[in-house]
Image (cartoon, helix red, strand yellow):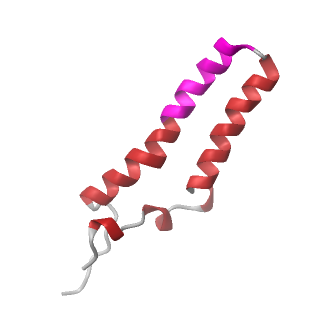
Amino acid sequence: MSDANDFNIWKYKPWWCQPWSILLTGIAIIAGSWLMFHRFWLTGLVAVPILVWMAYFLLLFPRLVAKYGGLREESDE
């Protein structure tokens, strides 16, 4: 039986939902907003939901799944 700390949610996710792709997508959207509009307030409006989305999927979601064992495989005991 594996410990909750050994659980890795990322091995169950497709390539487009890996930490590197979430980070690159978020950074690209925020940078694209700045490059297109050159307005702090508009880039801020874009950045806040993107940063919340990244924080949820990179920090909170993996901890919740590991804590509550949402994707644990059933073992034959």
Instruction: Name the residue nearer the viewer: 41 or 9.
Output: 41
Q: Position of residue 14 (x, y in %)?
A: 57, 62
* Image position, residue 61 (x, y; %): 39, 48
Q: Is residue 41 magenta?
A: yes
Q: Residue 33 location in percent, x, y?
A: 73, 25
Among the 4 quarters of the image, the one containing residue 46: top right
User: Residue 59 at what x, y percent from top left?
Assistant: 43, 47
Q: In this rendering, does residue 17 appear at all? A: no
Q: Quick check: 15 above or below 24?
A: below
Secondary structure mainly formed by the magenta segment? helix
Q: Identify the residue at image location x=47%, y=66%.
A: 12
Taking the view exactly as shown, the residue that stands out farthest to the bottom is: 77
**Residue sitting farthest toward the left:** 77
Name the residue at 73% across, 13% down.
39
Left or right: 32 as drawn, with respect to 60:
right
The magenta-colored residue range is 39-52
Q: Is residue 27 left or right of residue 35?
A: left
Whether 45 is drawn above or below 61: the answer is above
Residue 43 appears in the picture as rendered: yes
Give the quarter of the figure containing the N terminus: bottom left
- Residue sitting at 67 percent across and 38 percent down? 27
- Left-right relation of 65 to 55: left
Picture quarter with the C terminus: bottom left
Residue 45 sits above or below residue 30 on the image = above
Residue 35 colored magenta? no
Extreme residue toward the right, this view: 36
**Going 78% across and 17% down the picture, which residue do you hit?**
37
- Left-right relation of 49 to 24: left
